[in-house]
Image: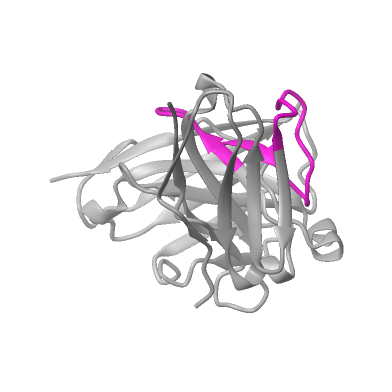
Amino acid sequence: QVQLQQWGAGLLKPSETLSLTCAVNGGSFSGYLLTWIRQPPGKGLEWIGEIIHSGSTNYNPSLKSRVTISVDTSKNQFSLRLSSVTAADTAVYYCARAPRKDLVSYNLFYYLPVWGKGTTVTVSS
Amino acid sequence: SSELTQDPAVSVALGQTVRIKCQGDSLSTYYASWYQQKPGQAPTLVIYAKNNRPSGIPDRFSGSTSGNIASLTITGAQAEDEADYYCNSRDSSGDRPVLFGGGTKLTVL
């Protein structure tokens, strides 16, 4: 049973850098689309970006200039960094795992069966 | 840019059937997935890949697609189904490869 365990700082000041890490426990890592999603208070889900084990990434254009997603295959972990945060970045941040990229492309499906529990990040001076 | 559109709120009487819709050009190519989210919890996948349910999801949940509209149907809604529901799909034509709908708040009366 795959589980995602995430952690990172929950309180930041404006202009600081958000840093979160997600560990993939009990399941495969290679080829899967490893994803970060956030949800501002009272609002919907926003896709931040994704990475696969090779390091290939895709980012939400609205955040691309500030986002870096990286992977540590030796630890089965992937990380999110978001620079120059403001109050608008206050949200619950989730990591999630989608199916392997080759299956997504071949079967034309995409879904997120496994999620972390979420980390509440508050940006306040 | 591409997007997925959902009605903000839908209500259903206890035991009746409700359909939650999601519209977007990406759904003409990719299957939608659906998530249930209750307050204070992470989203839970309820339907994926046309009409598949993960283990543990009741069979009153089903999915379908017609053209660029995906639907989540709950047949015989229960009180515990009251939640926010989000659709999601891949997108190969826009500037974002992954889309989420804005969410639908389901109230069970």
Question: Going 76% across and 57% down the picture, which residue do you hit?
Answer: A109
Q: Please indicate whether residue B55 sits to the left or right of residue A14 in the image.
A: right
Question: Going 51% across and 68% down the picture, which residue do you hit?
Answer: B3
Asked if residue B63 is positioned above or below residue A120 in the image, the reply reads below
> Is most of the magenta stretch helix, strand or loop?
loop
Residue A72's x, y, as percent? 65, 47
Instruction: Based on the picture, tell me whether residue B51 belongs to the magenta stretch.
Output: yes
Residue A49's x, y, as percent? 54, 59
**Residue A75 shows in this picture:** no
Q: Quadrant of the C terminus of chain B?
A: top left
Residue B69's x, y, as percent? 64, 62
Image quadrant where residue B99 sits: bottom right
Question: Which portion, as a residue range, is magenta?
Answer: B35-61
As rendered, which of B18 and A16 lies closer to the eye? B18
As rendered, which of B57 and A91 lies closer to the eye? B57
Residue B40's x, y, as percent? 40, 27
Question: Going 35% across and 59% down the picture, which residue do you hit?
Answer: A83
Question: Going 73% across and 52% down the picture, which residue do you hit?
Answer: B64
Instruction: Based on the picture, tell me whether residue B41 belongs to the magenta stretch.
Output: yes
Q: Please indicate whether residue A113 sits to the left or right of residue B18 in the image.
A: right
Asked if residue B47 is positioned above or below residue A71 in the image, the reply reads above
**View extreme (top): residue:** B79
